[in-house]
Amino acid sequence: MTDISINEQKNKRKGRNISIIIHLLLLLIAFLYFFPVVNEPDPPIYAVNVEFDFVESSLSDYAHEDVGKMRPKADPVKSIDPTPTPEVEVPKPDIDIPDPDPTPMEETTPPITTDAVQDESPVQAVEDDIPVDDPEPDPVPVPQKPK
């Protein structure tokens, strides 16, 4: 009986310690979530000095050598004499078209007529006015003057 109680006490201690560790980790995550993170300040803004002075450089001879100079005119284009292309005869195949066979004309049958007389229908149209009940107008209350 004592062995079971000792094992239960060890398991109880072990469970309590694990529970405390898990709760502390959750609290730590909650504190890190709610506290703001301090960002690094922006680096100072610096200015760039641009000088527009003309200073001779190693490539200035190449860059300014032909400024405003006209390009030399190109040689005139030689005229090309077009050679006429010979016409090629395209052979056309002979096509034999067979004569169509005459199709017999179908005889049309005359329309079918009946000798039966149709009886008059028992329903007859009546052109009398239908009586309509007019609704009674609702009485309009007259406003009373205060005394």
Image: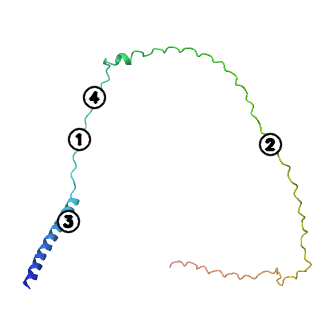
**Separation of marks 3 and 2 at Cα, in angstroms:** 96 Å
CA separation, marks 2 and 1? 91 Å
Side of 112 where 54 appears, left or right: left
* Mark linked to residue 49: 4
Crowdedness near tag 1: few (<14), some (14–19) or many (≥20) residues, C-alpha within 10 Å: few
Residue at image point 77% right, 39% down: 93
**x 18%, y 67%: residue:** 22
Vertical comparison of 84 with 118: above or below: above
Q: Earlier in the sequence, mark 3 or mark 2?
A: 3
Of the image marks 2 and 1, the number of the one nearer the N terminus: 1
* Sequence-first disc among 4 and 3: 3
Q: Which mark is residue 66?
A: none
Label 4: few (<14), some (14–19) or many (≥20) C-alpha neighbours in 10 Å: few
Give the CA distance from mark 3 to mark 1: 36 Å
Q: Are marks 2 and 4 in contact (CB under 8 Å)?
A: no
Residue at numbered disc 2:
95
What is the x, y in percent for residue 43? 23, 41
Q: Which mark is residue 26?
A: 3
N-term-proximal mark, 2 vs 4: 4
| Front disc: 3 or 2 | 2
Residue at disc 2, secondary structure: loop
Amino acid carrying label 1: it is Pro
Tell me: residue 29, above or below residue 6. above
- Pinpoint residue 37: horizontal percent, then vertical percent: 21, 53
**Which label belongs to residue 43?**
1
Q: Residue furthest right?
A: 115
Q: Position of residue 54 (x, y in %)?
A: 32, 19
